């Protein structure tokens, strides 16, 4: 795995803490696509995989119940960045990168995605739909997290292309906004 895999997995952890950990654990256990070095190889232990399955199910259902989903997001404010740090460090253990730097990068990526979701997107959706769209949006987040996790491992160059596309769009939007304010 390379750095793009790590960024994709940690961004996915910002949406759902356990999906990218579970994807990496299952791929390390059952395929040759993921190779984890010690201590990260513990993720592929059957007991750890079982715990990740249970935690994934708990988060899946907690995020679908009105009011409980906001409590879940508050709890996940601490869990998702840590999951991002773990999955980033595990993904870059084969690259010559400081584990502390890798964990910090994962923490920042997952924390940023989670903050955008929990502090901006979800409250706006709740306010504009009276909470009716929370369950479909939560399901969409789980689908995106799963797809992003798998793609980050299988096709990391796609993650690089998505990052470049998102940065280009952001720069274009900021440039366009700055030019509008000057007129």
Image: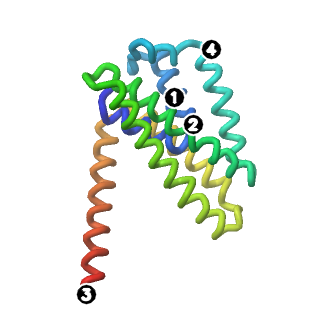
Q: Which mark is residue 47?
A: 4
Q: Vertically, is 145 above or below 48? A: below
Real-space Cα separation, disc 4 to disc 1, in angstroms? 13 Å
Q: Nearer the viewer, mark 3 or mark 2?
A: 2
Q: CB atoms at circles 2 and 4 under 8 Å apart?
A: no
Specify the quadrant that holds the N terminus. top left
Crowding near pointer 2: few (<14 within 10 Å), some, many (20+)? Answer: many
Mark 1 vs mark 3: which is more N-terminal? 1
Give how far apart the Cα atoms at labels 3 and 4 are: 62 Å
Q: Name which of mark 1 and mark 2 comes first in the sequence.
A: 1
Q: Mark 2 = which residue?
A: 79
Which percent across, then down, holds residue 147?
48, 40
Q: Circle 1 is placed at which residue position?
A: 21
Q: Is residue 113 above or below residue 121?
A: above
Residue in the foreground of this view, choosing between 71 and 50: 71
Quick one: SS at disc 2? helix
Please state, as top left, top right, bottom left or bottom right, where the C terminus lies in the image.
bottom left
SS for tag 1? helix
Residue at image x 71%, y 43%? 62
- Separation of marks 3 and 2 at Cα, in angstroms: 45 Å
Q: Viewer-nearest of labels 2 and 4?
A: 2
Which mark lies nearer to you, 1 or 3? 3
Is disc 4 placed on a helix, strand or loop?
A: helix
Q: Earlier in the sequence, mark 3 or mark 2?
A: 2
For residue 183, the mark is 3
Residue 33 image offset from top left, x and y in percent: 38, 21
Residues under numbered marks 3 and 2 in contact, where contact means CB atoms less than 8 Å apart: no
Q: Earlier in the sequence, mark 4 or mark 1?
A: 1
Q: Residues within 10 Å of mark 3 (few under 14, many from 20)?
A: few
């Amino acid at each position: 795995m390379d750095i793009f895999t790590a960024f994709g997995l940690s961004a996915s952890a910002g949406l759902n803490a356990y999906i990218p950990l579970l994807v990496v654990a299952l791929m390390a256990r059952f395929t040759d696509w993921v190779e984890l070095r010690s201590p990260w190889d513990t993720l592929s232990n059957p007991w750890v995989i079982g715990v990740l399955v249970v935690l994934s199910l708990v988060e899946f259902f907690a995020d679908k119940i009105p009011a409980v989903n906001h409590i879940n997001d508050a709890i996940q404010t601490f869990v998702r960045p840590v999951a991002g740090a773990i999955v980033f460090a595990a993904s870059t253990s084969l690259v010559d990168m400081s584990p502390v730097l890798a964990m910090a990068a994962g923490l920042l990526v997952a924390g940023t995605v989670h903050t955008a979701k929990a502090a901006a997107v979800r409250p706006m959706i709740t306010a504009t739909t009276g909470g009716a769209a929370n369950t479909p949006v939560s399901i969409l987040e789980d689908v995106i997290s799963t797809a992003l996790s798998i793609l980050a491992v299988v096709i990391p160059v796609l993650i690089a292309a998505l990052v470049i596309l998102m940065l280009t769009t952001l720069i274009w939007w900021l440039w366009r906004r700055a030019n509008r304010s000057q007129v």
